[in-house]
Image (cartoon, grey):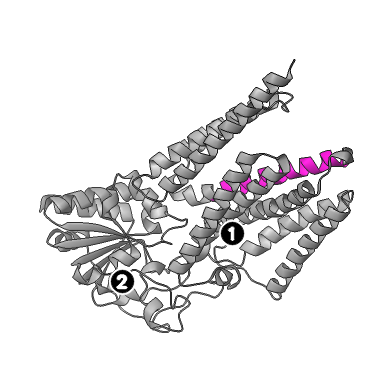
Amino acid sequence: MNAEPTRSIGLIISLTYLVAAVLFIVGLKLLSSPRTARRGNAIGALGMLLAIGATLLDQQIISFRWILLGLVIGSALGVWLAQAVKMTAMPQMVALLNGFGGAASAIVAAAEYYLLLQHPEQRATDVVVSIMATVLIGAVTLTGSLIAFAKLQELMPGRAITFPMQKALNFALLAAAVGLSAWLVVDFDRSTMFVALLALSLVLGVLLVIPIGGADMPVVISLLNSYSGMAGAAAGFVLHNNVLIISGALVGASGIILTQIMCRAMNRSLTNVLFGAFGATSATVAGDGVDRPVRTVRPEDAAVMLGYARSVVFVPGYGLAVAQAQHSVKELASLLEKRGVDVKYAIHPVAGRMPGHMNVLLAEADVPYDKLYEMDDINREFERTDVALVIGANDVTNPAARTDPKSPLYGMPILNVDHAKSVIVIKRSMNPGFAGIDNELYYNEKTAMLFGDAKKMLVAVVGEVSKS
């Protein structure tokens, strides 16, 4: 009597999962362009809503009480985070969310492991392998993301932390974790070994991320995002949930692709990012420690240079995010455009602390998408640019990446700001950037330093431009 309704519900669930998967793919495609990113985000969210709704129809759910409690708590936390977290802390939040995703997958796999301990007749080799993979990847993602969060939040040093035999230890721990996983596939009832696998994976996540310097954090966040997707896909195999497998695979694949794109933007391999310990040494100072003079300007001087220019390129960096100056940048750009100035924005792929950080900030200030130019497109424009206004961007504008073979940045593609006719740099001080490398741009005869908080300086410049 109940077979037909059950079959109908199963068909509805499968069709809904199919629609959700299509929405995920369409949403991901739309996220590839700033013009369609918001729509893509909404479509992806709709797909997830459908997937969750279909899962709640599953007859295997015994009680909705804990599900509803989790839904209420999670929704409340999501609303609070959306309202409370500042744009400057967005990289930290992304790191935490990656970690939460890995933790959720690992918890699901651990719960399934202990369930199968009690029901050996339900064990299947593919499920057992998936459990071990989920625990390993999920635990590494959790602790690795927590370390990334701590570095970004400056709860621990942002530089690379290294010690003797570190790489050998990491490889040994990875080999041990894989070996334990294989052992548990053959001898499933070794619960002590399962705990050891979990502990090793948690330690491995810490040791894999601490030797990565702050300048590489955008790549690390992208990679950890990929890990969380792979853990989710593996958890999908554990639960026999197709939509979880598809969504996890999409996140994992897109994260790996983005990671490779960012590595190419720095002219470095992923292996070099993970094991090169970039930033482990102390800051290098241009001129071999010789005190070199810099030219400074006041806001009124900068206003004259900008107001009478024919073309201006804004170069945003993390200093823009710290000062929450994106709206002031937009206001200044609007004033200059009213005076007939051609305004563009130069976006380096790894500017900021996470992928697309500058795009997100400028989108919040309603900067038109067609004004944002990627590095390869804008670099041809700098030679014809009257003024390049650098706002807190350090490593991505350092000419040493082109000229100094001894620099750790050497070979990294940068924004050719020094090719502009004049350069104005808004910066709090002469301290080096997150990579710990002094910027030769600041000593260039074409460069004028405007010292101070980016927002305050931009507001002052806006006031002076308005007067003239």
Q: Which residue is mark 1?
A: 156
Residue 468 image position (x, y, % from top left): 10, 54
Q: Which residue is mark 2?
A: 416
**Toward which corner of the image does residue 245 lie, by quadrant?**
top right
- Amino acid at dot 2: Asn
Q: 358 or 452: which is nearer to us?
A: 358
Q: 74 or 162: which is nearer to us?
A: 74
Q: Is residue 130 left or right of residue 284?
A: right
Indicate which disc, 1 or 2, sits on the residue closer to the N terminus: 1
Which element is circle 2 on?
A: loop
Q: Nearer the viewer, mark 1 or mark 2?
A: 2
Q: Can residue 26 be seen?
A: yes
Task: Please say whether residue 6 is one of the residues in the magenta stretch.
Answer: no
Q: 271 or 401: which is nearer to us?
A: 271
Which element is circle 1 on?
A: loop
Residue at 14 percent across and 58 percent down: it is 307
